Amino acid sequence: MSRSAKFVSCGAAGVVLLVALRSVGASEPVQESSMSEGAPRMIEACVAYAAERKLPPLSVAVVDETGSLVNFTRQSGGAGLTVDAAILKARTALQARAPTSDLTADMSDATARDIYLLLHVTTMPGGVPLMRQDGSLRGAVGVSGAQPDQDAACAAAAVGSAVATAGTHGEQEGPVGAAIRARLKEFEDAWNAGDVARVSEQYHPSMFAIYQSAYLNYTQYIKLVKEGMNPRVRARLRLDVESVRALGGEYALANGREHDVGKDGKDQTNLFTVIYKRSEGTWKFVYAHT
């Protein structure tokens, strides 16, 4: 199993969430706001993440808490249709107060599809909200132009850059930070012990996963995890968590480095960004990517 098979984008959402959404037009001009200062840095982080992975040209949109566009870029060669798609992803994430990947699972439900169309929102991965420590919305990022899981990873990298620059170590992380660090340590220990049950427990039971551009349900993904945890191929995992931040009361985002030490002793290192959701009295993965 490759490194990215451990951490992939995933999520689920119900129709109840959608009735709270409101459509925001895509033609509003760029406006100044509290997001303006940090937006260029977020776009730079997204573009850098994409360049490292040789992704196709992207469109990246940053909106503030009102849904107004505060910064935008379309890379040279990017398709024109990615412009509106990136903006729509950002605004959907803002109104849903959750990554757009959380909404994708509802596409199998006819009623949910009708509501999405009515409210002019998107279920495509690539939109991620940014929240303040008090749980209020600060804005959101939308990315379009690559594969769905790649768009989502780039958006998470953008949000992660904003989180990292806000200061997120020690007491500033609070109890949520301690809980997420503990969960990631549990994941690391379970992986290295070959404990499939404990690793599987970290994922939301109604999750779907995007792996190598394929959509997998929970059962399919756990099968993939079991294959990767075979002692003959399993790399030893070490997670160095660099930052954690609450995204409102129900979500939390963590950034760090994943070290995979193979059977040959070589250490392969990747950056990771994960988003947890509070569920059943604990925290479970709803989005993750290396």
Image: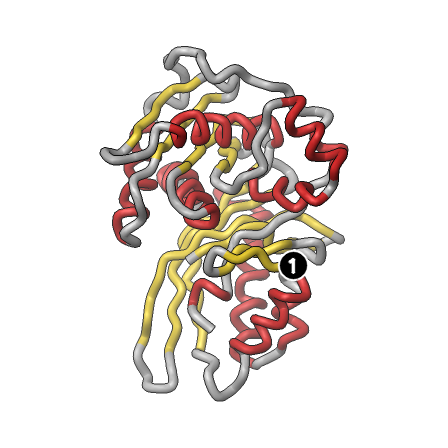
- Give above or below for 266 relative to 61: below
Q: Quadrant of the C terminus?
A: bottom left
Quadrant of residue 193 within the rendered picture: bottom right
Q: Residue at the left extreme?
A: 76
Q: Is residue 189 above or below residue 170?
A: below
Q: Nearer the viewer, residue 281 or 54?
A: 54
Image spot of residue 99 (x, y percent): 55, 39
Mark 1 lies on residue: 217
Residue shown at the point (45%, 30%) measured from the top left: 85
Residue drawn where x is 59% and y is 48% of the image: 176
Q: Secondary structure at mark 1?
A: strand
- From the top left corner, tell me how far across and down residue 282 is, in percent: 69, 55
* Residue 94 image position (x, y, % from top left): 55, 28
Counting from the top left corner in percent of width and height, residue 228 is at 52, 76
Q: Is residue 15 above or below residue 12?
A: above
**Residue type indicated by callout 1:** Asn
What residue do we see at 50% from left, 65% from top?
A: 6
Q: Nearer the viewer, residue 54 or 257?
A: 54
